[in-house]
């Protein structure tokens, strides 16, 4: 199936930023924090642990974290705060009413975490971000800085043409006014949040979503200034204590209940191997189930829709570091990390040169919207099971016709939702010429070294690599034939309609275009080589999950 760009110049469904749900939410930030504290405390009180147990574990873990893994972004009073709280907790044991004093301490900790997690939204900052991202993507996706364009910020239409959107665009636009929308994208690059936010705003014409940003990003003051005002909430992956985790989950649940649209990266972090995620983090997904059940039990008229999204790049700026991390974990003693001989300054200037020389495009494919149980939904927000029969989500949260809370049942629902999202990722993945070229090239190198395992192949000196171009083209055709026989065919870009030579040449142009070492390059018209086998392997992995017969 050939991808078609379905989102050209779509009008905004809510033109004024001041009327956007996320702006209304930000204006009530203090009120939301007060509700969040009560919501979180209620969850903690219903757990099997007492306030004393929760505080004891949390304070211990926070003292360890602040001593052993401090970050620049941490509050200046971090050590003193937790040490003081430890003494206060110990003193509470000898008071007239220890339980009451410990609940007071618990409430203060939840308040501290709530303030830390919750971000803000500023329409003026968002409008500036629109201009900045137009400039950024213009430079990444259009060759020649400013050439043939007027104005420092570039032309929005030129950028829109380079970001291709396919899939259920109309359905998502209509569902926005039917309930709360949660977009769950694949995750490859630090560029993803900016790209998806820009695509949602400029291509789909939908108001901004709340999204999670790693607290480590706030180490950079300029970055922190912007993302703190663009609807981001802070996620500190160092914190594993029960109070923080419950506050974070409660924030996600309560904001969904109150109609705040979200972007969740269900993989939790960027794909290190370059492959589509095959496992998802269930914590935030569980908050989606939790929020829907709460709405049903409390008779809140709010339905939650989950929309998978697959993003495809010809390049990932940080691919070299990501695949290195993946190979170190999977290879252990088999993997010997090679040190780069090029200087960082040299690499920077090579990147700048490539940005002027090349252009590229990015593909975004929007999957079929579903409810929190993974059932497909129509434009009106009604759910249908796999037989096409209408279903009432309310029935999934009843036992003996009585609405109830059942954590074991909902953990199963979370796994079902995760499986449906993973299935959608594979169906919506857009295969690019660069991906299939990398797959074919690396497969040829493996065929030429049949007795070598992966890590032995990666150690082959690149100067010894010579692969006939005709062999690579044959591999491309075999891979396409296999993919076209699949029950759920993946999506192909229009270049695949033009024959193997066009696919081959387009792949050569685009594959890893901004890397200092090209994953594939021509020795002559008949032979190919690789400047970096690890990068070639990374882009090859984009097709790995299809298990193509070699």
Image (tube, rainbow, N blue to C red):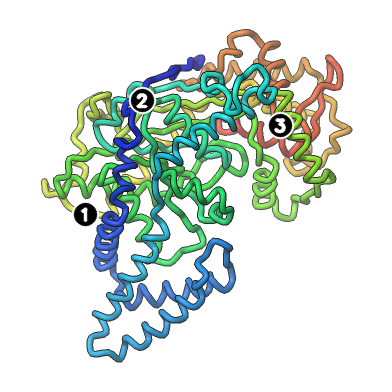
Q: Earlier in the sequence, mark 3 or mark 1?
A: 1
Q: Quadrant of residue 315?
A: top right
Q: Earlier in the sequence, mark 1 or mark 2?
A: 2
Mark on residue 91? none
> SS of the residue at dot 1?
loop
> SS of the residue at dot 2?
loop
Does the residue at mark 3 contact the one at mark 2 (Cβ under 8 Å)? no
The residue at which mark 2 appears reads as 12
* Residue 399 visible from this viewpoint: no
Pair 3/2: label in front: 2
Distance, label 3 to label 1, CA atoms, is: 51 Å
Residue 141 is left or right of residue 167, and the answer is right
Q: Position of residue 193 (x, y in %)?
A: 50, 39
Mark on residue 514? 3
* Residue 17 visible from this viewpoint: yes
Q: Position of residue 480 (x, y in %)?
A: 60, 17
| Above or below, comparing residue 280 to residue 467 in the picture | below
């Amino acid at each position: 199936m050939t991808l078609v760009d379905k989102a050209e110049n779509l009008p905004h469904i809510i033109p004024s930023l001041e009327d956007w749900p996320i702006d209304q939410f930000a204006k009530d930030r203090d009120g939301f924090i007060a509700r969040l504290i009560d919501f979180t405390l209620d969850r903690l009180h219903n757990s099997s642990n007492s306030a004393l147990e929760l505080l004891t574990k949390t304070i211990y873990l926070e003292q360890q974290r602040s001593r052993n893994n401090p970050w620049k972004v941490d509050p200046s009073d971090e050590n003193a705060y937790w040490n003081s709280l430890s003494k206060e907790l110990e003193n509470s044991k000898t008071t007239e009413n220890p339980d009451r004093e410990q609940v007071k301490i618990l409430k203060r900790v939840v308040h501290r975490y709530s303030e830390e997690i919750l971000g803000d939204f500023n329409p003026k900052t968002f409008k500036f971000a629109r201009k900045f991202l137009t400039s950024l993507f213009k430079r990444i996706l259009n060759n020649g800085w400013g050439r043939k364009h007027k104005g420092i910020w570039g032309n929005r239409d030129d950028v829109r043409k380079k970001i291709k959107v396919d899939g259920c665009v109309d359905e998502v636009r209509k569902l926005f006014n039917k309930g709360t929308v949660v977009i769950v994208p694949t995750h490859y690059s630090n560029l993803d949040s900016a790209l998806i936010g820009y695509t949602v705003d400029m291509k789909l014409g939908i108001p901004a979503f709340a999204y999670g940003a790693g607290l480590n990003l706030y180490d950079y003051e300029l970055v922190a200034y912007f993302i703190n005002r663009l609807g981001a909430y802070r996620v500190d992956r160092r914190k594993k204590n029960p109070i923080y985790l419950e506050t974070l989950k409660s924030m996600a649940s309560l904001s969904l209940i109150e109609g705040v649209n979200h972007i969740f990266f269900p993989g939790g972090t960027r794909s290190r191997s370059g492959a589509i995620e095959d496992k998802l983090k269930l914590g935030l997904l569980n908050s989606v189930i939790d929020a829907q059940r709460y709405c049903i039990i409390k008779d809140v008229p709010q339905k939650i829709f989950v929309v998978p999204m697959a993003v495809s790049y010809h390049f990932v700026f940080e691919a070299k570091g990501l695949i290195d991390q993946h190979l170190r974990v999977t290879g252990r003693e088999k993997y010997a990390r090679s040190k780069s001989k090029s200087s960082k300054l040299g690499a920077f200037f090579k990147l700048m040169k490539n940005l002027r020389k090349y252009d590229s495009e990015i593909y975004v494919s929007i999957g079929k919207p579903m409810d929190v149980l993974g059932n497909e939904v129509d434009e009106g927000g009604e759910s249908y099971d796999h037989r096409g029969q209408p279903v009432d989500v309310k029935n999934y949260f009843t036992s003996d016709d009585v609405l109830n809370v059942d954590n074991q049942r909902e953990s199963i629902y979370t796994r079902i939702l995760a499986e449906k999202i993973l299935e959608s990722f594979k169906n919506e993945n857009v295969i690019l010429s660069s991906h299939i070229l990398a797959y074919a090239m690396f497969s040829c190198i493996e065929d030429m070294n049949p007795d070598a395992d992966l890590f032995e192949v990666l150690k082959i000196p690149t100067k010894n690599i010579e692969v006939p171009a005709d062999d690579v083209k044959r591999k491309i055709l075999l891979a396409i034939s296999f993919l076209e026989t699949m029950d759920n065919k993946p999506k192909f870009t229009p270049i695949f309609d033009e024959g193997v030579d066009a696919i081959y040449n387009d792949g050569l142009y685009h594959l890893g275009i901004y890397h200092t070492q090209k994953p594939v390059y021509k020795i002559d018209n008949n032979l190919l080589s690789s400047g970096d086998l690890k990068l070639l392997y990374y882009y090859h992995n984009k097709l790995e999950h299809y298990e193509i017969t070699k």
